[in-house]
Image (spheres, rainbow, N blue to C red):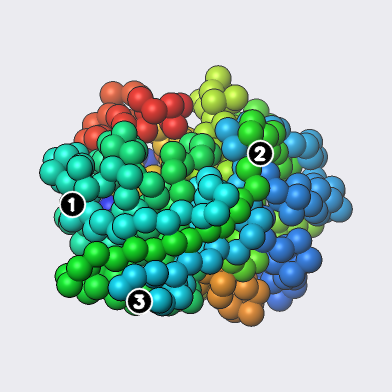
Amino acid sequence: MRRLLLPLLVPVLAAPAFAQMPVAPQTRSAVAGIVGDIMVNGQAYEYDRQLADTVGPRLTGSENYVHAVSWAEEKFRELGLANVHTEGFTIPSTWEPETPAVGRITSPRLQELHIYSLGWSPSTPSGGVKGNVVYLQHLTSDGIEAQKDKLAGSIVLMDDKSLGDQSAFSQILQALDHLAKIGPKALLLVGGPNGTESATALTFDGSISHFPIAQVGREDTSLIRRMLDHGPVTVEFSFKNRIRKNVKVDNVIAEIPGRDLPNEVVIVGAHLDSWHPATGAQDNGTGVATAIDVARAIKISGHPPRRTIRFVLFGGEEQGILGSTAYVREHRADMASIDCVLISDTGAQRAKGWYLMGRDDEKDALKDVEPLLAGLGSNDTTPSVEFLFQTDHISFDLLGVPTLVLWNDVDKYFKLHHKASDSFDSVDQADLNQGVATTAATTYAIADSSQPFARHDTPSQTEDWLKDTRQWEDYQFFKSAGVFP
C-alpha cells in the first residue's frame, strides 16, 4: 500500500441502491468446502514465507522482483491454472540503494545523523551534499515564495508542521514542484524514530526526483530545529543509488475459466512489489499469498464458478499504482466485462469485511454474501475512502468497475509498513487464513452468481462520486499528470 503523506479522511455521501446478489444453494455448498479447505489446509502462510524469505525484498524492476515474477508464474502453473502469462509495462526509472546513506551535522557541533535515501532520489554528487539548513515553514506555493531567497542553494528541512492542514495530496505535489524551481541543494524529510527507516518516494509516476532527498530520524529532525532556533546549522550527507531508465516490468496473470460465462471476469489482485528495508511479508506478501491460495482452494474444489476468475499480481504499486493502471489502459475495451475487482493490500490482521470506497450500491449487493462470512467474523463493510488512491483498485474505479478492498485492522500493520520490521515473523497464520477465506468466499459467490455484482458507473456517475467524496481535486491533478487512465 502506498501510504500518502496525509490521511484522506473525508465524509461519504450515499449512492443509489443496486439489487442484492442472490447466492444459490449450490454456491453456498461450494463456498463451505472452499472455506473449510483454507482454514484446515491453507497454504498462504507457506507462500508468504517463500516470497519473503526466499525471494526477499522486491523493489519494482529489481533482480529480486524479476525472481518474484518467475516464482509466481511457477506457483500458478503448479496449481493447474489456465492462461498463465505476464504482461509488461515500462517504468520511467528503477531505483535501488547501492551504498548506505551517511550524514552528520557539522556545525554548531558534530552529530551523526540517522539518515536514509528516500526512494527514487538521485544519488548525491561525488563528495556528497554540504550546506546550510533552512527550515521550510509552510509547504505551499506562498510559503515557498516567502522563503525563496533562503531556500535557493540550501538544504531544506521539512517536518510534519511544514505540511500544515493540507488535505489534498495534489497540493503537496504541486508545492514540491514549486520548490524544485527555486533550486534547493537537497531536501531533508522527517522520518520515524531515530534508526527507523520508513521507505517511500515523493514522485508518483516512477520518475526520479529533481534533487537528492533524504529521510532523517524524528529525534534528529527535532535536534536540528532546536539548533536553528539559536543560529545557523550545517549538515553533510551522501549516498549512491542505482538507477536505470525505461525498464520493462511484468504483471503476472492466471485464470480459472468460468463454466457458463467465461467472458465475464472477476479479478482477484495484489501487488507483487515491495520496499527494501525488510522482505515485504505484510506489504504485500500477504496479499500475494492470499491471491495464490484463493486460486489453489477454488481450483481444487472441482467447482469452477459461472464466471472466469482472473488472478493478477501487479508491479509498481509502491511507485504510483503503475502496474494496475497499465493493465487498465491495456484492457480498457474489456472493462465492461469485468464484474468486480477484489484487492488485498492491508496486511494480515483479521479481516472485518470490505472497503466499499463510498459505493453504497455495493453494500446492498453484498447483503446475501454476508451470511457466508458471518462465521469468519468478516461480514461487515465500511464506506471509508481513507485509502482511495493508495492501492490497485483505483484505476478500475475510475472507469466505473465495481471494486472491493479487503478491510482489516491496520494498527499493527502501520507500525511495520515500509519498515525493517515488515518481515515474515510478523505474520499470524490463523489471521492470514481468515482473510484468505473471506476473499475466497466473496470471490466465489460473486463469480458464481446468476446476476452481475453491481452497476458499472458512467463517467458522469464517477465524477459525482469523486466530488461527493471530496477527491475531485486530487483526481484532476493526477489525471492531468498522466497518472490515471
Q: Quadrant of residue 14?
A: top left
Name the kind of residue labelled 3 in the image: Arg
Mark 2 highlights which residue? 244
The secondary structure type at the circle numbered 3 is: loop
Q: Earlier in the sequence, mark 3 or mark 1?
A: 3
Nearest the eye: 27 or 439:
439
Name the kind of residue labelled 2 in the image: Arg
Mark 1 highlights which residue? 138
State the residue at coordinates (22%, 48%). 150
Give the percent coordinates (x, y) of residue 263: 65, 28
Q: Which mark is residue 109?
A: 3
Considering only vertical position in the picture, is 1 above or below 170? Answer: below
Name the kind of residue labelled 1 in the image: His
Can you name the residue that lies furthest to the top here?
333
Give the percent coordinates (x, y) of residue 168: 25, 45
- Label 3: few (<14), some (14–19) or many (≥20) C-alpha neighbours in 10 Å: few
Q: Earlier in the sequence, mark 1 or mark 2?
A: 1
Considering only vertical position in the picture, is 274 above or below 168? Answer: below
The secondary structure type at the circle numbered 1 is: loop
Considering only vertical position in the picture, is 99 above or below 203? Answer: below
User: Label 2 to label 3, Cα distance in Å?
Assistant: 38 Å
Nearer the camera: disc 3 or disc 1? 3
State the residue at coordinates (20%, 42%). 148
The secondary structure type at the circle numbered 2 is: strand
